[in-house]
Image: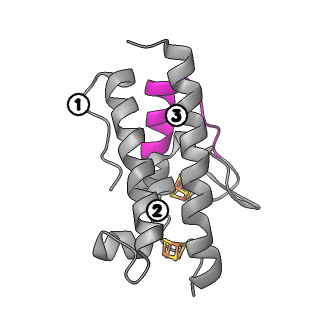
Amino acid sequence: MANEASLRRRLIGLYAELAAHTEPECAAHCAKPRTCCEAQYCALAIDHAKSHWHVDLVPTWHAALPLMGDDGCTAAAHLRPICTAHTCAVCEHGTKPGDPAWTARYQSLTRTIETIEAELFDDCERAPLR
Ligand code: SF4
Ligand code: SF4
């Protein structure tokens, strides 16, 4: 395996790029921001952070969503992979209809992430990004 520390740094950077790519899709268009958040996804993030990054995500004050804070999700992008990769369009269509450039960038980032995670984490339990 390539140097683990450098792979992890690369992964953190890729997830930050993916978040920057997906978040504007919500910020610009969502009629009901963050309504796609559910406690089960927070639970997956808490488990992923612990098992793959040895990070204990601390629950917030939020009664329904353990990782939701005053300014949105408190988990770093790489610690909540499913949420970072999620957009309504990708969930519904697998692409962003009418925007092949956006879709190509999305697919490039997620493919690279999946390749690195397969090498780094070496398990079959990681949830797919989409
Ligand atoms: S993924 Fe969809 S429902 Fe969730 S915040 Fe973005 S636009 Fe809104
Ligand atoms: S984005 Fe954050 S608060 Fe929303 S479901 Fe995912 S982990 Fe929970």
The residue indicated by pointer 1 is 124
Q: Nearer the viewer, mark 1 or mark 3?
A: 3
In which quadrant of the rendered view does residue 111 lie? Answer: top left
Residue at 40% x, 75% y: name it: 96
Whether the residue carrying mark 1 lies under 8 Å from ligand 2 is answered with: no
Residue linked to disc 2: 38
Q: Is mark 3 within 8 Å of ligand 2?
A: no
Is 11 displayed left or right of 58 in the figure? Answer: left
| Mark sitting on residue 11 | 3
Mark 2 CB within 8 Å of ligand 2: yes
Q: Position of residue 88 (x, y in %)?
A: 42, 74
- Residue flagged by tag 3: what amino acid is it? Leu
Q: Furthest-front residue in view?
A: 101
Residue 77 image offset from top left, x and y in percent: 58, 46
For label 3, the crowd category at 10 Å Cα-Cα, with few meaning under 14, some 14 to 19 and many 20 or more, is: many
Q: Secondary structure at mark 1?
A: loop
Quarter of the image containing the C terminus?
bottom left
Side of 87 relative to 15 (left or right): left
Identified by mark 2, the residue type is Glu
Tell me what residue is drawn at x 50 percent, y 39 percent: 46
In this rendering, position of residue 37 left or right of residue 68: left
Sequence-wise first label, 3 or 2:
3
Q: Name the quarter where the N terminus is drawn.
A: top left
CA gap between label 1 and label 3 equals: 18 Å
Placement of 16 over or under 51, stated as above or below: below
Question: N-terminal of the two: label 1 or label 3?
Answer: 3
